[in-house]
Image (cartoon, helix red, strand yellow):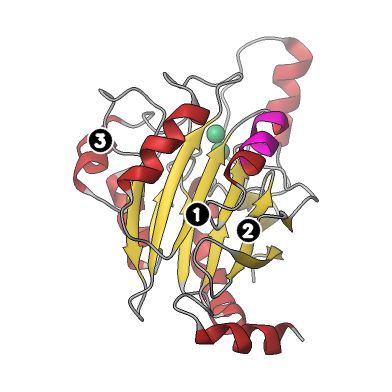
């Protein structure tokens, strides 16, 4: 049935477009898990676009030009970020010069990088990618709810739009889903590293999930070695955190786009162990 729907939708200008969005890659283990899962996922899901959140890919915090280049070389079309964007200084000029990597659009204008980009598929399909940061418990200079309008306006002619709403509070993410319903193809939440069970297409046609989860070690505490996380909570003293390597999984979603621009047909959660 899903196959028939996919074939039927291929008549329209953006029908048949599939977006694989993968949640926060945590450390080298997260990057390797993605790159090892990707061939299998390409075969099974045939994504037109692969977009990943890379804010934790460099040793668990931030991203470096080297790790970003490895992701692009591995077939990633665009990278989104979040509150850890500026952890590694060497990424600052890269954020300005590489169009395919976006940091939250509602950061201050003076901060390095940009919040929106457009990537093109093999068939000429144009996907707009926007990154936002929540304003509750996260540092973002401007409101996600007002700045999204500017970011959408910057995209120009596109067939579909994916918004990564990187936020701590579920309420902000749910509200952003409703705010953009019918105007973008998908609003996907990131940051908490724990997948939520609420993936659905909203009535206006926007695919939505509060958090897609992380790509990294399930054996830790949202990416950190569990003994260290527990020690920190137990002793209330500073503890040096390292990325866990235990039980790595890929967590993401596949969004099947409708033939009509800015509309999704379905959103499917992808949760798989490293092969
Ligand atoms: Fe993260
Ligand atoms: Fe984050």
3 or 2: mark nearer the eye? 2
Q: Which mark is on residue 90? A: 3
- Which residue is identified by label 2? 252
| Structural distance between the alpha carbons of marks 2 and 1 | 13 Å
Disc 3, SS: helix
> Can you give x and y, in whole percent of width and height, for residue 94 in the image?
23, 43
Quadrant for ligand 1 reads top right
Q: In which quarter of the image is residue 104?
A: top left
Whether 173 is among the magenta residues is yes
Question: In the rendered structure, are the residues bearing label 3 and label 1 in contact, judged by CB atoms less than 8 Å apart?
Answer: no
**Which is nearer the eye, 214 or 221?**
214
Dot 3 or dot 2, earlier in sequence = 3
Q: In which quarter of the image is residue 112?
A: top left
Q: Residue 162 carries which label?
A: 1
Q: Crowdedness of circle 1 by 10 Å Cα count: few (<14), some, many (20+)?
A: many
Q: Is residue 96 above or below residue 205?
A: above
Look at the image and tell me in which quarter the N terminus lies: bottom right
* In the image: residue 266, left or right of residue 198: left
**What residue is shown at x 40% (from left), y 45% (from top)?**
152
- Give how far across and how far down residue 66 sits, in percent: 29, 51
Range of the magenta residues? 171-176
The numbered mark, 2 or 1, whose residue comes first in the sequence reads 1
Under tag 1, what secondary structure?
strand
Pinpoint residue 12: horizontal percent, then vertical percent: 50, 81
């Amino acid at each position: 049935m899903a196959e028939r729907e996919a074939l039927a939708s291929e008549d329209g200008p953006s029908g048949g477009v599939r977006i694989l969005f993968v949640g926060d890659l945590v450390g080298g283990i997260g990057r390797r898990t993605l790159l090892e899962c990707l061939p299998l996922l390409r075969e099974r899901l045939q994504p037109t676009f692969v977009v990943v959140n890379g804010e934790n890919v460099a040793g668990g915090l931030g991203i470096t030009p080297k790790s970003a280049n490895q992701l692009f070389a591995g077939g990633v079309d665009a990278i989104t970020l979040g509150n850890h964007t500026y952890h590694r200084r060497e990424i600052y000029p890269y954020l300005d010069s590489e169009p395919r990597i976006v940091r939250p659009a509602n950061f201050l204008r003076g901060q390095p990088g940009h919040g929106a980009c457009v990537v093109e598929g093999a068939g000429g399909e144009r996907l707009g990618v926007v990154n936002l940061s929540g304003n509750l418990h996260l540092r973002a200079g401007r409101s996600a709810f007002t700045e999204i309008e500017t970011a959408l306006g910057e995209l120009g002619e596109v067939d579909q739009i994916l918004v990564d709403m990187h936020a701590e509070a579920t309420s902000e993410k749910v509200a952003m889903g409703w705010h953009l319903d019918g105007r973008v193809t998908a609003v996907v939440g990131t940051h908490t590293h724990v997948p939520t069970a609420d993936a659905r297409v909203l009535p206006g046609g926007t695919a939505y999930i509060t958090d897609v989860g992380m790509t990294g070690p399930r054996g830790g505490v949202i990416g950190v070695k569990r003994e260290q996380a527990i020690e920190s909570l137990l002793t209330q003293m500073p503890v040096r955190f390292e990325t866990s390597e235990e039980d790595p999984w890929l967590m993401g979603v596949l969004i099947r786009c409708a033939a009509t621009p800015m509309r999704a047909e379905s959103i499917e959660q992808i949760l798989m162990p490293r092969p």
